[in-house]
Image: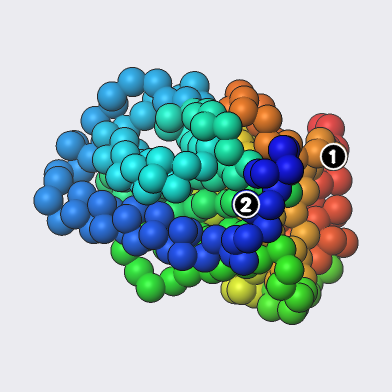
Amino acid sequence: MSLILRCKVREMKDFASFLDDMARTADSAYVTAMSTMTAAERSADIGIGGDGTPTMYLDQYIEAPVLDVIEKFGANVLSEEVGWVDRGSAVTVVLDPVDGTANSAAGVPISGFSAAIVIDDIVTEALITWLGTSHRWHAHVDDPVVRRTSGRTRLDGASLSMLRPRPTTWEKWSRLAQSAERLRVLGASVIEGCLVADGAVDAFCDPGGDIHRIVDLAAVSLLVEKSGGAVRDAFDRPFTFEPDLTLRWSGVVAAHSDLAEEIAGLIRQEG
């Protein structure tokens, strides 16, 4: 980063208002889509997104106005749908404008907006909102760690959220499900991560499917860590902010690092 860019970044005390503008814009588009479009219109396949997966019309409808907000600010963007937009800025927004698209496209109101401000490969500020509701989670890198998670250290007796099972993860998914006390599948990773931060759920994970991208994990990692929890990859791969959305992880979000390690160990276990 150049000296001029470093000075400009230092002059910005935080990015809270910028994040708020993005979140309000996403929520406004979400509310309009849910009230004026049919499920078929929201779920229409419009092509392949920046992450190499199919894009629904709802994704684009919510992302487009958020990208306008970011463009006015002049930041780089790494987003699930548009991919990497390089504006030569010191600031990158790692964005998932609507996580849980399949839920909301069908009319299930469990979707989240997620944005992380990344400078020099460090998440400096993050905001996640539950679209269509007043629920929101915010954290800054300079915030103190205040334990809000449940603090649970063992999977026995825990409440666990997971991504849905797939043929390649069925055995691991079943092993984890049988070890926990309660199981939930909500279909919105950023919301499930925030529920861990709040202490409502003890842990959340991708059971070894390598489904998570950095847009699913960047904001959650700061929020959960500032709540006393732990976020890691099940296979010990470091999270990176390279402009490559083909990179995948099996994220583990837990109330305590011991619980995260136990879950990761069960995911790595063969047979």
**Which circle's residue, 2 or 1, is located before the other in the chain?**
2
Asked whether 248 or 171 is in front, the reply is 248
Q: Which residue corresponds to the image point at 76% horizontal and 75% vertical from the top-left? A: 144
Q: Is residue 268 above or below residue 129?
A: above
Q: Residue lying furthest front in this view?
A: 4
Q: Residue lying furthest left in this view?
A: 36
Q: Which residue is mark 2?
A: 8
Q: Which residue is mark 1?
A: 236
Q: Left of 51 or right of it: where is 178? A: right
Q: Left of 133 or right of it: where is 167? A: right
Residue 171 found in image quarter: top right
The residue carrying pointer 2 sits among few (fewer than 14), some (14 to 19) or many (20 or more) residues within 10 Å by Cα, namely few
Q: Is residue 240 visible?
A: yes
Give the residue type that dot 1 points to. Answer: Asp
Asked whether 19 or 160 is in front, the reply is 19
Q: Circle 1 — which element? A: loop
Q: Which residue corresponds to the image point at 69% horizontal and 78% vertical from the top-left? A: 148
Quadrant of the snapshot with the C terminus: top right
Q: Which residue corresponds to the image point at 52% horizontal and 32% vertical from the top-left? A: 87
The residue carrying pointer 1 sits among few (fewer than 14), some (14 to 19) or many (20 or more) residues within 10 Å by Cα, namely few
Residue 160 found in image quarter: bottom right
